[in-house]
């Protein structure tokens, strides 16, 4: 049995040896691979220093001074600088044009609209024979300029008398005669200063009133410029709470000349704002407080009563120095109706005629003074910031007559 097993093992070993030889011979008979270009692997380049060092392509060589040292403030990656948000600059405070002689400087604007009155009168008075028809034409010219019936009749009578005494009439004599009579009609004796003195501890208080659309807010802002030009400090009270943009508009006017504006919520109590404005004026030691009121229809009793309330509340601090009524000169005789009603509610102390450069009816100056018994103190002659001028009778009459 052992002999049989041994024979099987020997046989298996012989078979394995023969198989190995066959495989080995087959491997040796495989065709060799096709020849290819030999791959040459270059040894790593040795680092070079000094003059032999190569600079990277596209970069300039830097010196030691160009390279920041640690701790010198230079960093490999600098964070972008944080730029603070821009703060809007405060509007530059303007220096208003001096008020002295302002109407004289604006005479050209006034004469362009009013010259027809003076030229018309001079032409009629220069006729060789002044008959009744001519005097009627003179009267019609004055009435068309809104001088008013009573003042017109007075002027015509005086002109008749002086022309009769004068006899011969040269153009220069007629001009002098007409100038004197118109000056007498306008009045040269009235106090036309805007009073803003106030008391020892209370600023002067000026209230601006008028109907819608006459330019009260703009006039208040321009009046602030007139006062600042004369060296006065001003606080503005935005008591027109019914018109949405009124307070913003007044504040803009104030900022231009460095005057602070006291305002309240839209639709707030105008009397309360007017009271606070005077209170702030006292606290700041201001010279003048200007109070802009809402436009009121002279036919609305409730609005007019509210205006009286504003006046009474302000007078708790002290008396009002001025109540200025703003009238649109282009409305003519209709402005007299408005003036009459306002005078019944508040004691008007002065008149501001706006848009006087836009009408040929300069006679309204005479008519409104006669109607209210108070003088015209300021006139508006344009839309510019410094186009509000103190009224000067001589300059006004000279503009009427022309050169």
Image: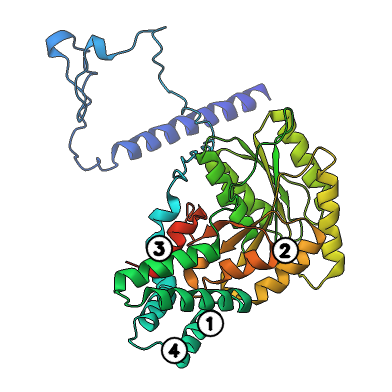
The quadrant the N terminus occupies is: top right
The answer to which image quadrant residue 373 occupies is bottom right
Specify few, some or many for label 2: CA neighbours under 10 Å numbering under 14, 14-19, or 20 or more: many
Q: Residue at x 34, y 37 (%)?
A: 27
Q: Nearer the viewer, residue 126 or 372?
A: 126
Residue 184 position, x and y percent, is: 52, 63
Above or below: residue 190 compared with residue 68:
below
> What's the CA distance linking mark 4 and mark 1?
15 Å
Specify few, some or many for label 3: CA neighbours under 10 Å numbering under 14, 14-19, or 20 or more: many
Mark closer to the chain start, 2 or 4: 4
Horizontally, residue 268 falls left or right of residue 200, namely right
Q: At numbered mark 4, what does the secondary structure look like: helix, strand or loop?
A: helix
- Residue 269 appears in the figure: no
Q: At numbered mark 3, what does the secondary structure look like: helix, strand or loop?
A: helix
Q: At numbered mark 1, what does the secondary structure look like: helix, strand or loop?
A: helix
Mark closer to the chain start, 3 or 2: 2
Are discs 2 and 1 less than 8 Å apart at CB? Answer: no
Above or below: residue 317 compared with residue 55:
below
Are discs 4 and 3 less than 8 Å apart at CB? Answer: no
Image disc number at residue 295: 2
**What residue would you read off at disc 4?**
134
> What's the CA distance linking mark 1 and mark 3?
19 Å
Mark closer to the chain start, 2 or 1: 1
């Amino acid at each position: 049995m052992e002999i049989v097993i041994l024979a099987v093992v020997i046989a298996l070993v012989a078979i394995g040896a023969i198989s190995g030889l066959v495989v080995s011979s087959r491997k040796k008979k495989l065709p060799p691979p096709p020849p290819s270009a030999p791959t040459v692997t270059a040894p790593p380049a040795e680092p070079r220093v000094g003059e032999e060092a190569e600079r990277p392509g596209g970069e300039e060589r830097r010196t030691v001074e160009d390279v920041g040292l640690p701790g010198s403030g230079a960093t490999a990656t600098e964070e972008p600088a944080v730029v603070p948000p821009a703060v809007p600059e405060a509007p530059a405070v303007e220096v208003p044009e001096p008020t002295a002689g302002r109407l004289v400087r604006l005479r050209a604007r006034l004469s362009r609209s009013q010259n027809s009155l003076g030229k018309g009168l001079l032409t009629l008075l220069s006729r060789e024979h002044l008959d009744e028809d001519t005097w009627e034409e003179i009267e019609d010219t004055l009435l068309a300029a809104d001088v008013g019936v009573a003042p017109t009749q007075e002027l015509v009578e005086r002109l008749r008398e002086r022309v009769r005494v004068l006899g011969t009439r040269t153009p220069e004599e007629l001009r002098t005669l007409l100038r004197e009579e118109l000056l007498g009609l306008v009045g040269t004796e009235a106090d036309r200063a805007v009073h803003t003195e106030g008391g020892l501890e209370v600023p002067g208080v000026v209230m601006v009133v008028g109907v819608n659309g006459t330019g009260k807010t703009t006039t208040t802002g321009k009046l602030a410029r007139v006062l600042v030009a004369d060296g006065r400090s001003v606080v503005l009270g935005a008591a027109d709470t019914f018109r949405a943009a009124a307070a913003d508009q007044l504040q803009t006017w104030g900022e231009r000349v460095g005057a602070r504006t006291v305002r309240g919520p839209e639709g707030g109590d105008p009397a309360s704002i007017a009271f606070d404005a005077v209170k702030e004026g006292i606290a700041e030691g201001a010279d003048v407080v200007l109070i802009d009121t809402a436009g009121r229809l002279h036919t609305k009793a409730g609005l007019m009563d509210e205006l009286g309330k504003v006046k009474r509340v302000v007078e708790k601090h002290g008396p009002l120095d001025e109540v200025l009524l703003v009238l649109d000169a282009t409305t003519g005789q209709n402005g007299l109706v408005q003036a009459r009603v306002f005078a019944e509610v508040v004691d008007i102390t002065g008149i501001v005629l706006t848009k006087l450069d836009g009408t040929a009816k300069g006679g309204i100056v005479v008519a409104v003074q006669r109607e209210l018994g108070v003088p015209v103190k300021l006139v508006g002659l344009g839309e510019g910031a410094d186009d509000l001028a103190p009224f000067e009778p001589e300059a006004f009459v000279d503009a009427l007559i022309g050169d």
